[in-house]
Amino acid sequence: MSPEAPQILAFAWPRESPDAGAEAQAWRDALRARGWRVLDAGPGLEVWGYGRPLAVRRLHAGLLLVGEAHPRTPGASCPQFDQPLLRTARALADHHWGEYLALLREPGADRAWVFRDPSGGLDALTWRAGQIVAVANEITHLPFGLSPHDLALDWDAITDFVRRPLASLDRCGLAGFHTVTPGDLHPLGASPGEAVPIWRPAAFAGNAAMEDAEARLRAVVDEVVDVQARRVGRAVAEVSGGLDSAIVAISLARAADPAANLIGLNYYGDRPEGDERPWARAACAAAGLPLVEVAKPVGEVDLSDFTDFARAARPAFNALDGDRDRHTSRLALAEGVDAVFTGKGGDAVLFQSPTPRVLEDYRLAHGRIPWGDPFALDVARWLRRSVWSARRAARRSSAPAYGARAGIWGARTREAVTTPAHRWLTDLDDMPPAKRMQVELVAASQMAAGPCRRTAVAQVRHPLLAQPVVELCLAIPAWAHVAGGRDRAVARRAFADRLPAVVAERRSKGALTSLYSRRTAASLAVLRPFLIEGVLAEAGVLDRRALDAALQPDALIRRPDGARVMGAAMVEAWVRHWQGRAPDLRTASRERLRSRA
């Protein structure tokens, strides 16, 4: 794929060790030979880049910023931090937002640290190779000799990727590489157990009324979009026809320079539930944007949709919609687009999920709920069930974050899950259930930052997942987000005067589930042998007999398994690539899995 998404590699070594200095020189030689370029070189710590450039700023001897860190106060400049490590990381989290990695080193100390911004906009993997410790946002073009010396395939993690794709955001299927969790201050080369959590979404989760929620939401979205729209000459706004993308598109049109060239882009299915063009047209008319409408095909998938991303650090679930991803990237190249703006994350952040759990959050905030309470009646009408049924369901324990078990999963997936899919989801038991659900959904929304063809050709912006928006929306109670029996109620009120009524008052939601199932059915000639004869089935992660039964046209029409099948194919391609480059991890090998199959 060309051009290439920005890749950053920072590596550090003991400055007083001649052997480490020789290793560092070997890294430089290997990187130059692969087309990398040096972006910053200090004593014992260097930053190199590949592909489209990312900004690198040295604020002082002990702090390098890679990417974009914006001050919370508009117009203020980024201060020259010169404090102990923890205070510096906390100051960044408290007073800035953006997509960045901060590289820190205390004066006189050899140990280097990385702080990953809380939005998770830039991935971060850290590892050790000899005396060198390193961190990178991606490893696609990393010279293989610079990989961890103990590189191995972790089949426990691979199994979890099939069962809980969210787990791929917080662990790497390649042992030797360690994921830096967003909001963590992490020593380079160390395991996650040595990281210091600086920012967690749970710290912002609120269940108390906020009188000025609408005004604050409007202001923070405007601020984020205004900052992200600066220096954008030409941009695409993905306009699905839903509320979230309409808010972003209209805010973008208001914030962008009058000379900026903006385009609305809508993809539609071939059935009424997947065709949202009337709402997309209304949103673009309100924003003053021309709208490009593109029909989504139901044709056969291409294996390159999976194999093109197999060299990445983890399975590229963000690239699963291959036709759409390919079209957007081609359009961006043809039109000279600088940035693509989306409404991704809005379902989680603005709280779209229809759930009776909001009644329990409401009860915890207000005490006993009378049977005739207007809020309870509104929620019941919203869920289309009786008040009694909604109240009873609200008291039930929450379902697993990964949902119901899939029939195609193998024996290994039946082992009990003992850890959360993401470190953000630790210690949430005391949180109100709907708010806990929102935190889980916000964590899962980080998938939007993963590699895909779009990120290779343009900046992909998700304003609703920016740290200030996430923090505010988590602080707003879940029951306030559904006031009046409407999902995203705060957002609807906050932007009511900008949105066309047909969008603001829309109660239905588009769905492409049928299209994806039919596309999977049309691709069986490719997918059946790829999965049934694949390494996941061989290892017992997928069940061959169940796959044989599920990968039939009639079965796919009856059961909406298309997305899970495509996700499994992405993991399959990723494992096939790496199994020829790394042995199995002894403590989590495929041999152990076969014995359980």
Image: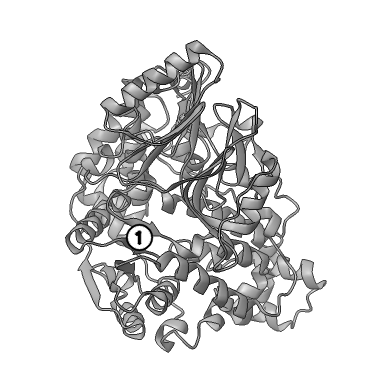
| Number of numbered discs visible in the structure rendering | 1
Q: Write the residue at 42% across / 51% down.
A: 449
Where residue 105 appears, as percent x and y from the top left, is 60, 34
- Identity of the residue furthest to the right in this view: 367
**Residue to which mark 1 is pinned:** 513
Please say if 571 is above or below 582.
Answer: below
Where residue 270 appears, as percent x and y from the top left, is 23, 68
Q: Is residue 16 visible?
A: yes
Q: Write the residue at 53% across / 53% down.
A: 119
Q: Amino acid at mark 1?
A: Thr
Where residue 448 appears, as percent x and y from the top left, is 42, 53
Residue 195, located in which quarter of the rendered image? top right
Q: Nearer the viewer, residue 536 or 420?
A: 420
In the rendered structure, the answer to whether residue 49 lies left or right of residue 92 reads left
Residue 33, located in which quarter of the rendered image? top left
Q: Write the residue at 44% across / 50% down.
A: 447
Query: Quick one: SS at disc 1?
Result: helix
Q: Nearer the viewer, residue 122 or 285?
A: 122
Please say if 472 is above or below 147.
Answer: below
Where residue 185 appears, as percent x and y from the top left, is 62, 39
Please say if 200 is above or below 515.
Answer: above
In the rendered structure, the answer to whether residue 432 lies left or right of residue 268 reads right
Q: Nearer the viewer, residue 227 or 164?
A: 227
Q: Write the residue at 34% across / 33% down.
A: 574
